[in-house]
Amino acid sequence: MAQEMNEPAMNIIEQSQVAPPQGSLPSTITPLTFLDIPWLLSRHARRIFFYDFPFPTTHFLQTALPILKHSLSHTLQHFFPFASNLILPPHPHVPYIRYLEGDSLSFTVAESSPADFTLLTSDSPRDSYDWQPLAPVLPSQRTSHDGTCEFPLMAIQVTMIPNSGFSICVIFDHVAGDGRTLHHFMKFWASVCKAKGDLDFPCSMPLPLYDRNIVKDPKGLMHVYMQDLRNSALLTKQFRGVLRGVYTDKIRTKGKGR
């Protein structure tokens, strides 16, 4: 049975926004395909990555953090849907992803001294609650006067565990990309970070493709899925929220890299 618990105290060091470099992208509308529509009713996905860093928090803030943020900005230039918003206009219009100059994602930096980095990164099963404080929260939706709703598509939290390491937790919407897209994003970010933000370095990572015109819909499934979506009782202001503070009796274990 689910029970409510108080989350461990976290020291929030910084709450900021990270955007693609100014002037690097035009305003862009990315239409959804019929394959994207079912994901509108899904819960957000979370992925946590751990990195060894046996130094104090001050050293991390002075050395690693600026590179992380700078390289993230340049990565978002190519993975701009993650800095965009999902737009849900009133009927009969269909949802789409919109990027406007200045759009950004939420970026939180925190410190968790009580956390045990060795236990969190071990292969032993752990209470899923132990990972909860490492996860960010997507900002709330915005609703305009005509009923159009805007939903952020990604948020990132970096949590430093002093003298041990740090985690990067990404919460994202499946409408913006699947698991393969997310790992492509993380690998590309890591490559740019390794080069300290130097975009002239030779990068073997391919660029993402956002041409939705290659997905054909000869049977008109977009109309069918949209009709089902509008008839769903789940299409409310709450359906895209992520519950925090409520946990079930579950355990988690670290996945093996390939």
Image: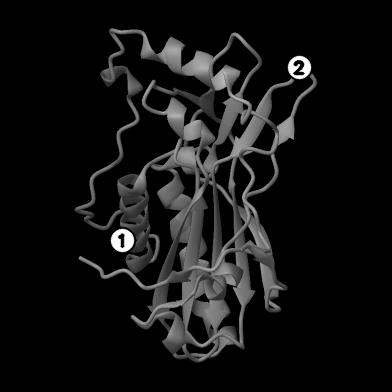
Q: How far apart are marks 2 and 1 (CA)?
A: 42 Å
Q: Which amino acid does label 1 sit on?
A: Ser
Front position among marks 2 and 1: 2
Name the outermost residue toward the front: 1
Give coordinates of residue 50: x percent, y percent.
41, 74
Q: Which residue is drawn at 41% across and 43% down?
A: 79
Q: Is residue 27 visible?
A: no
Q: Which of 224 and 163 is in front in this view?
A: 224
Q: Which amino acid does label 2 sit on?
A: Asp
Q: Mark 1 — residue?
A: 191
Q: Mark 2 — residue?
A: 146
Give coordinates of residue 234: x percent, y percent.
61, 31
Give coordinates of residue 110: x percent, y percent.
62, 73
Q: Is mark 2 on a helix, strand or loop?
A: loop
Q: Which of 100 and 3 is in front in this view?
A: 3
The crowding category of the residue bearing disc 2, from other C-alpha atoms within 10 Å (few below 14, some 14 to 19, many at least 20), is few
Q: Which of the marked residues, 2 or 1, is nearer the chain's N terminus?
A: 2
Q: Answer with left or right where residue 5 lies relative to residue 58.
A: right
The crowding category of the residue bearing disc 1, from other C-alpha atoms within 10 Å (few below 14, some 14 to 19, many at least 20), is many
Applied colour scheme: one colour
Q: Which residue is drawn at 44% across and 43% down?
A: 77
Q: In this view, does 218 lie above or below 34?
A: above
Give coordinates of residue 28: x percent, y percent.
49, 26
Quarter of the rendering containing residue 4: bottom right
Q: Answer with left or right where residue 53 lies relative to residue 240.
A: left
Give me the disc on residue 18.
none
Q: Can residue 237 be seen in this view?
A: yes
Q: Is residue 106 above or below residue 65?
A: above
